Image (cartoon, helix red, strand yellow):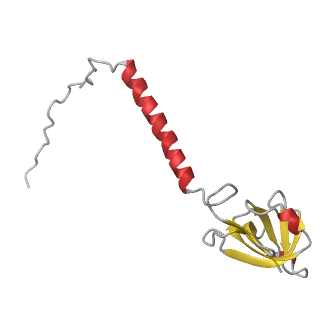
Amino acid sequence: MPNQEAVLPDQGKIIQPMESTKALPKSIILGVYALLVLLGIGTGYLLAQKNSSVGLGSKAKIMQTGKVVGSTDTKTFRDSAEGVIEKGGVDGEGTHRLIRDPKRPDQTAFLVSSVVDLDEYIGKKVKVWGETFAAKKAAWLMDVGKIEIQ
């Protein structure tokens, strides 16, 4: 195979970047920023409307019968547990606790609620439906959406 040398074009020349000859008017730049802000606000509003199916003031139906109180949203509040509600969480996680088995404290579920006032059920045996959340201290942290007195 013959020895071939690569020849590079323009060796030794320094290439300078081209300078812009015209700057954009400030009114166009401000208009683009204003449009971006309006689009961001509009997107946030639409997402808030779409995701407002949970919580107080939402479009989810809240039922209240003699024994059952809470949301009818079974897709969000699909986890359930039974026990006696007590006041207090653990290390800032949960406002209440659900004592499922007094002999097994590791089975306690810690509760918060965006829908139901849990203070009304302290000391009562209940079944709760909710959404489980990751927690750092609590073994089980649940946002209660529906509660039934047993």
Image spot of residue 29 (x, y percent): 39, 25
Residue 138 quadrant:
bottom right
At a point 73% along the width and 59% down the height, the residue shown is: 114
Instruction: Pick the quarter of the image with the N terminus.
Output: bottom left
Residue 140 vs 50, above or below: the answer is below
Whether residue 141 sits left or right of residue 35 in the image: it is right
At a point 23% along the width and 26% down the height, the residue shown is: 15
The residue nearer to you, when weighing 89 against 56, is 56
Image spot of residue 45 (x, y percent): 54, 46
Whether residue 145 sits left or right of residue 7 in the image: it is right
Residue 127 vs 7, above or below: the answer is below
Q: Is residue 83 visible?
A: yes
Residue 100 quadrant:
bottom right
The residue nearer to you, when weighing 4 against 76, is 76
At a point 76% along the width and 77% down the height, the residue shown is: 81
Residue 136 vs 18, above or below: the answer is below
Q: Residue furthest left?
A: 2
